[in-house]
Amino acid sequence: MKKLIIFFFIFLITMGSSLGVEIYQEKNKFGLKNNEEIILEAKYKKLIRLGENAFIALKGSKYGVVDKEGKTLLCFKFSHASRVLGKYVKLKNNKGYGLYNEFGETIISQDKDSIELLFGGMFLVNKNYKYGVVDKNGKQLIDYVADDIYMPKPNVMRVKYNNEWYEIEQVSASTLTLPSDVKNIKENDEFKITKLITSPVAASKYSLVTTADYSIKVFSSISPAYEATIDELMLSQGAEAVSIFMKIGWLPKFPVVYFKNYFKILRNPINGPLSKMKEEIKQEL
């Protein structure tokens, strides 16, 4: 019994030392250290572990990525950051969204309107208001040609292309895994492909709601566009600055950036006051 207790303590010590780099806090800021050796000074407002190799860091008002040795992998130029599956980070700047792994390598380039996680570790990507699907290694499975894509079940994907809905079901598995040559996918024992015959009533409702949604968005997009413009121009001067309102270098750019954001929000087919209703009707199609 005594030997067992000694072994248990040795195991705990070994496990603690194997953790290596850890986050420490000093004066409400965060840094990195390895045991007592400081790797990164505590100057970051946030440090979030990214996989086993890196950390998402917030410095001032901008996000970046640093590795466990303190090296900057991605510069601090992003206004938003979110961790995906524990080892990917989705970052946003004025170019759009991009996705990177824990080594700072680009998985999805920084020019996308949106990036969302799908079942099976795939990503639904929107570029210029067309949808595509990319796998977790950056492989393009479906080009940016679809009007809409969603997955009602883990093993089912529905794709709207040229105003027609198609359903891909992987009958041999509980979670869909698209092959790399998805263009040549054929119905067999593994996959079932169906061209959906939409309900006339549901299709009519969907069209009606879409038209109404667009009309409402003409006015409802004013506030989100204003917020996006403030975020892009004003906060880029430094959110911590006491004299932020005095830094008016952003002011002449305001009208151009505002209208750019306004029309971007207005054109987005899935971003409107009635989008939830459209999603519910879409399930009936």
Image (spheres, rainbow, N blue to C red):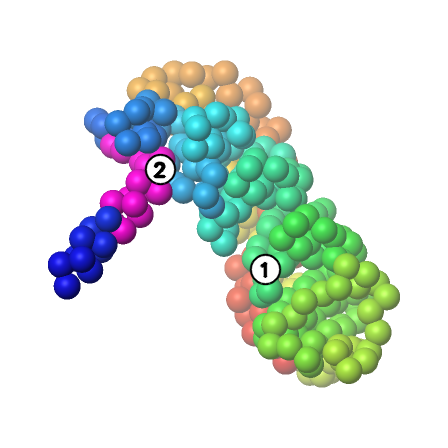
Query: Callout 2: few (<14), some (14-19), or many (20+) C-alpha neighbours within 10 Å?
Result: few
Residue 257 in picture, x, y percent from top left: 59, 31
- Circle 1: residue type: Gly
Q: What element carries label 2?
A: loop
Query: Callout 1: few (<14), some (14-19), or many (20+) C-alpha neighbours within 10 Å?
Result: some
Give the mark nearest the N terminus, 2 or 1.
2
The residue that label 2 is drawn on is 20
Based on the displayed image, in which of its 4 quarters is residue 68 positioned?
top left
Left or right of 190? Residue 22 is left
- On the question of residue 73 being in view, the answer is yes
Pick the residue in front: 39 or 277: 39
- Circle 2: residue type: Gly
Residue extending furthest toward the left: 2
Q: Residue 247, relative to residue 92: is it above or below?
A: above
Q: Is mark 1 on a helix, strand or loop?
A: helix
Based on the displayed image, in which of its 4 quarters is residue 57 positioned?
top left
Q: Residue 187, relative to residue 277: is it above or below?
A: below
Residue drawn where x is 55% and y is 64% of the image: 274
Q: In which quarter of the image is the N terminus?
A: bottom left
Q: Residue 168, relative to residue 99: is it above or below?
A: below
The stretch in magenta equals 11-25
Residue drawn where x is 66% and y is 50% of the image: 137
Residue 27 in picture, x, y percent from top left: 21, 27
**For discs 2 and 1, the disc positioned in front in the rendered view:** 2
The residue that label 1 is drawn on is 121
